[in-house]
């Protein structure tokens, strides 16, 4: 049973994200996903938000080292089914407008 998924320092391609989006919902005990410095884009961030909302056991999401200047990180928290308790965005260069959007998503 997969409980923790770590993917670090490699490019998260659309093809790999598609594979993960197919597999993750069936990982009923997946508690944490760490995607450190994987070159996320606005498109992959949006898809990741959709995928993580379909994992009811997910509690921790680490996206450290993925700066996305116009990325809407608040999507990760505002999905209706999202149960993420810990979201780490170190080294993502979060702007004040992105911080505001995350704050609104936490309400």
Image (spheres, rainbow, N blue to C red):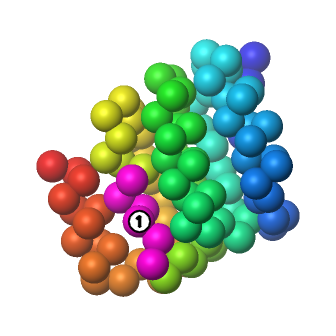
Does the magenta-highlighted stretch encompass residue 84?
Answer: no
Query: Helix, strand or loop at disc 1?
Result: loop
Residue where numbered disc 1 is placed: 72
Give the vertical position of 49 relative to 68 (above or below).
above
Q: Left or right: 2 with respect to 55?
A: right
Looking at the image, the residue that sits furthest to the left is 107
Q: Give the percent coordinates (x, y) of residue 56.
A: 47, 23
Question: Which residue does the image show at 62% across and 23% down from the upper left?
Answer: 25
Please state the horizontal and vertical placement of residue 85, each as a whole percent of the image. Answer: 38, 40
Examine the residues drawn in magenta and state their main secondary structure.
loop
Q: Residue at x 42, y 50 (%)?
A: 76
Residue 26 position (above or below residue 22): above
Side of 44 relative to 76 (left or right):
right
Residue 21 pos. (x, y %) = 68, 36
Tell me: residue 15, above or below residue 42. above
Q: Residue at x 28, y 79 (%)?
A: 97
Residue beneath the point at 41% across and 65% down: 72
Q: In this view, does 99 lie to the left or right of 49?
A: left
Mark 1, other Cα within 10 Å: few <14 / some 14–19 / many ≥20: some
Q: What stretch is highlighted in magenta?
A: 70-75
Q: Quadrant of residue 95?
A: bottom left
Q: In this view, does 79 lie to the left or right of 12?
A: left
Quadrant housing the N terminus: top right
């Amino acid at each position: 049973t997969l409980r923790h998924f770590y993917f670090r320092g490699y490019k998260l391609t659309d093809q790999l994200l598609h594979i993960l989006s197919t597999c993750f919902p069936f990982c009923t005990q997946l508690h944490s996903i760490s995607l450190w410095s994987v070159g996320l884009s606005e498109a992959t961030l949006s898809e990741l938000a959709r995928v993580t909302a379909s994992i009811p056991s997910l509690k921790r999401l680490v996206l450290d080292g993925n700066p996305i200047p116009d990325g809407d990180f608040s999507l990760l928290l505002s999905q209706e089914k999202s149960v993420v308790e810990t979201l780490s965005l170190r080294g993502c260069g979060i702007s004040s407008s992105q911080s505001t959007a995350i704050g609104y998503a936490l309400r």
